[in-house]
Structure formats: structure tokens, C-alpha cells
Image: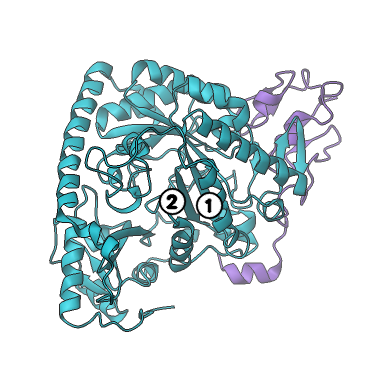
Amino acid sequence: MPTPFPTSTASGCSSGRCGSSAGQMAGLTDDVARRVQDHPCYSEEAHHHYARMHVAVAPACNIQCNYCNRKYDCSNESRPGVVSEVLTPVQAVKKTLAVAAAIPQMSVLGIAGPGDALANPERTFAVFRELQKRAPDLKLCLSTNGLMLPEYVEQIVAAKVDHVTITINCIDPEVGTRIYPWIFWNHRRIHGREAAEILIAQQQKGLEMLVARRVLVKVNSVMIPGINDQHLKEVSRVVRAKGAFLHNVMPLISDAAHGTYFGLSGQRGPTPEELQTLQDDCAGDMAMMRHCRQCRADAVGMLGEDRGAEFSIAKVEAMEIDEEAAMAKRLALREAINAELEVKRATRHSAGSQVVTLHRPVKPVGRAVLMAVASQGGGLINQHFGHAREFLVYEASASGVQFKGTRRAAQYCGGEADCGEAEDVLQRTIAALAGCEVVLCSRIGFEPWGSLEAAGIQPNGEHALEPIEEAIEKVWAEMLKSGRLGDTQMSQRRA
Amino acid sequence: MALEIIEGCVNCWACLPLCPNEAIREARPHFEIDPLRCSECVEAYAEPQCAAICPVEGVIVDELGMPLNPPGSLTGIPSVPPPQASLQEGH
């Protein structure tokens, strides 16, 4: 059985990182960790500091998934497969250069649809080729269902794409028949079990070929309760054995208003707690991704924000861009951010908190507590509760602070009837925070404070502008000191 | 002999690059097939390529107006939602 990254030459502790960098970077080899350190989607740490964008140049798709509907374009929606305008390759290059000039934190350009990047190979590779010439500092990545992957591995390598995401929801064709009604293959539409068999075989072959060529491969899986939730543990084991460096288990987004098969047939998505349990089960010793935001195929900006509206085709066409100056600015900023992060890592390393796991105390003192954080980046508690579009969830325990994932806040919508009623937004946000006992934010209004307390979630604005993990450690220590973390079993607060 | 794209097409582009006769063009409100170029893929392929990849039921029709992908043939989504489904969802 191959090691997770067979071609890696790094081993042991070099550069003072030795797998001890916080959270989900644990489990990556040093070589892989270096390659993803400024990638906001792959590095939990980087996502506080770097920005990414997707360009929607790949409209066509060659399979049907039961969670997807190609019809919709609602600018209030945020989910894969949805975009506001499809770009030509020329427009996509211009937009990328414009965004990368305006947002120097930009480090990654991805092609993720709205269809499948490799169902539109000419368009996808035309963008990569041009950007390789004009903005060689940007990392290129693509996302695919894997059906055409084996055919394009050589082109992916030639285009210097260093990250590929394959969506793999199953390795068992019986499970596949419940997720994929058809695929387009060799000029024919193929249904049922045969379709699932072909797709699965192509995905696995593509994964192996990319790993052999040293392209980093992340695997995305959509967790569909009752269909593939248990099966994903096996998927995780297999893709890891084949050399995927990261497995990202995402919740099914299912709503009748989206017009998908799952939405209309009443297939529910997982609760945040079910998702977290499965992610924990899948994690093993493999890096698990917990900060994925399931971005739109035209997302722009830091993770969790979308500045796409500032860069519409019309606005981009009118922009004057000094490409060289913009690249110089990006490189300088990246150097500064990485230097800052190195200092942080070194501090963490010397603090010794992560060594605790090696000498596990005989009797653990204090139970683990989930805490939610409102942050707009920089690794700080720096957002008003009411402005948060999402919350970062951490688990604090005697062995330290671990990032567990994100929860979306309910949103006031732009007025579409099917986007929800305004009055229950707070209650829906509170429901999304189920299981959390504390919410940390820079400020919070009187009314939500009371509602959160009533729901058993303690609001806390005392650590505004402090680094997230340090503040969580302090809050947990206070809870421990006040006797609230007695060694009784985990209290399940809400269903 | 030609196929036609009708209302309901979502302009997803899947068909356009597949047409062996380059008969499909990007248009609004939806993509169009040039009837003079379309051969329904006879002799070229076992199935008309546009209809073989189109993800939307009922939007590619033959000269008699018959859909090549009739309702229920692709997604399994019922064309008329059952009454209990609409009660449940309340949207």
C-alpha cells in the first residue's frame, strides 16, 4: 500500500513544523504542508489571510448528480454549480488579473464550473495557459467529477496545475445509482449501475494517475444521510491509501426551492452535529478539511466572503491593470504574511501545548466544549454577532483547541419569497449553533444576547480583537476554574 | 430533418461543443439549432449528441415536436409534484 504521498522526500522534523502546526495541517507531510501553506481552501491557517477566486468558464457538465440543478442563478444563493454570468476564457483571464490587482491577498485561481472543468477542456486550459504566462505567481487548481480525468492528466501537469479536487461520493456502484442518474460517456447517455461503475472507475484511475504525477489531490464528498453517510468512511480510507492529501466531507445542500431531485424528494441534509461526527470518524490520521465554504463557481475574495459583484464583466472590462506592479505587490504581501505566520508557528511550537497528547493525563480534567467564533479574518475575534455570515467552531479541551468546522448563520435575503422569513433568522442562527456552549464575537446586541442565553449558549464579547485560539483557551480555562466542566459525561444540550 | 431547442433550455452549453455539424449557436433567450445544418447525427453517432447530454427534459424536440428526453426520463423528478410534497415543503 503506498504511503499517503509516496514521492515526498521530507520526513521527520525540518523547519520547526514537524506536523505540529495547528488543526487540520496535522497529518500532512512537510512537503505537502509547504505546498498548501498559502492556499486558503486547503490550509485552515491560510484561509484567515489569503483569498481565492473561481472563474466560471466551464458551463457544460457531463453527468447528472441528484443534488444539482443546472437551472438556477440566484445571486443570494451560495452553493456550487451556481453562477451569475458565464465567462469566455478571455474574460476570465481579464477578471482574474483585475481581482488579483485589487485584492493582493489573492493566491489561488480555481476553475470549478458551474459545470465540470474537464467537460469544457478547451475553455479551462486556455485560461490556465494564459495565466501561467501573465500571473505565474497564482496557484492554479481545478475541480472535477472525475469522469474525464484520466484523459486530461497530461494536460493538467503541462498547465502546472498543482491542486485538483475530485468529487467522490462513493466507491460502491450500488450507492452510486442513488446519487447519479446518468453520465455522458463515449457519445452516449448511460443510466443506472453501468453509469455509476464507469464514473467510479474513472475517478479512481484519475486519482492514481495524478498522485503518480505529484499533483496534489483533494477529495470532496457530499454527505447524504441514509445514502452514503456510513459508506464515506470506506471512501475516506481508500482515497487516503491511494494518496489523496485531504478529504473534505461536505453537507448535502437540499432545499425544494433549488429544484434538485434530492430537494424535491425530501432528502434531508445532515445536521451540523452529524457532519462533525462523520468528519471525526473519517479523519483517522488523515488531514480533514473543516473550513470548506462550498463556494459558488464564481466566488471571489476571502473564504466566507464573496466580492463577485465588484468584478462583473462590465466593470472588469473598464479596468486598467498594471499586471507587473500587481504581481510585485502580491509577492511582497505574501512574504510579509508568511513571515508573520512563521513567527506564530514558532511561538506555538515553543508553548508546548501540543505535546500534551503524548503524555495524556491519567484522568482527563474538564470535558471538551464547542465554541463558535465570529471572525472576518486575520485569525481574530473581530466581528459583530449580527454581521456574521458564518461562525467558526472550535473544540476546547485539556489537550488544546481544535478547529472543527463552520456553521452558516441564517441570512436576511434579498426578498425572494423562497429565501425565508426575516423574523426567524435569529432562531435559525441559534439552531445552526446547536451543540456550541459559547459564542465569541466582538460585539452583540441586547436581544440576541438574551435569546442565546435562553438557548444555553453563552455570548462573550470580552475577547474582541484577540487571536481566536488564545481567547478560546482562556474561556475554557475560566469555565474549568468555575467548576462548569466537571468530569461528568458530555452534556448534550440540544437535539 | 432537424432537431429544435425550445423554451426551457437553461443555456448550459453542454450540447454546443458536441455537435458534429456545428449547428448549435449561443443565443437568447436560449440556444438554437440551425435546421439547415442539423442532421440529427444520423450516420455520425448512435444518438443525437445534443439530446444525449442535455440535462433538461423536454427541451430538445424532433420535427413532430416530440421530446427526445420526455418527462421523467432523466432526473426522476415528477413533472407535477405530488400533493403531499407541496404541503411538506410549504414554499
Residue A151 percent coordinates (x, y)? 62, 26
Residue A486 percent coordinates (x, y)? 26, 83
Q: Element at badge 2?
A: loop
- Identify the image quadrant of residue A360: bottom left
- Identify the image quadrant of residue A152: top right
* Labels 1 and 2 touching (C-beta < 8 A): yes
Q: Amino acid at mark 2?
A: Met
Chain letter of the purple region: B
Q: Earlier in the sequence, mark 1 or mark 2?
A: 1
Q: Which residue is mark 2?
A: A286
What residue do we see at 48% from left, 28% from top? A87
Q: Which residue is mark 1?
A: A236
A149 or A53, nearer to the observer: A149
Chain letter of the cyan region: A
Question: Which chain is indicated by disc 1?
Answer: A
Left or right for A257, reference A462: right
Question: Which chain is indicated by disc 2?
Answer: A
Left or right for A492, reference B24: left
Residue A54 percent coordinates (x, y)? 42, 35
Number of marks drawn: 2
A429 or A85, nearer to the observer: A429
Distance Cα–Cα, label 1 vs label 2: 9 Å
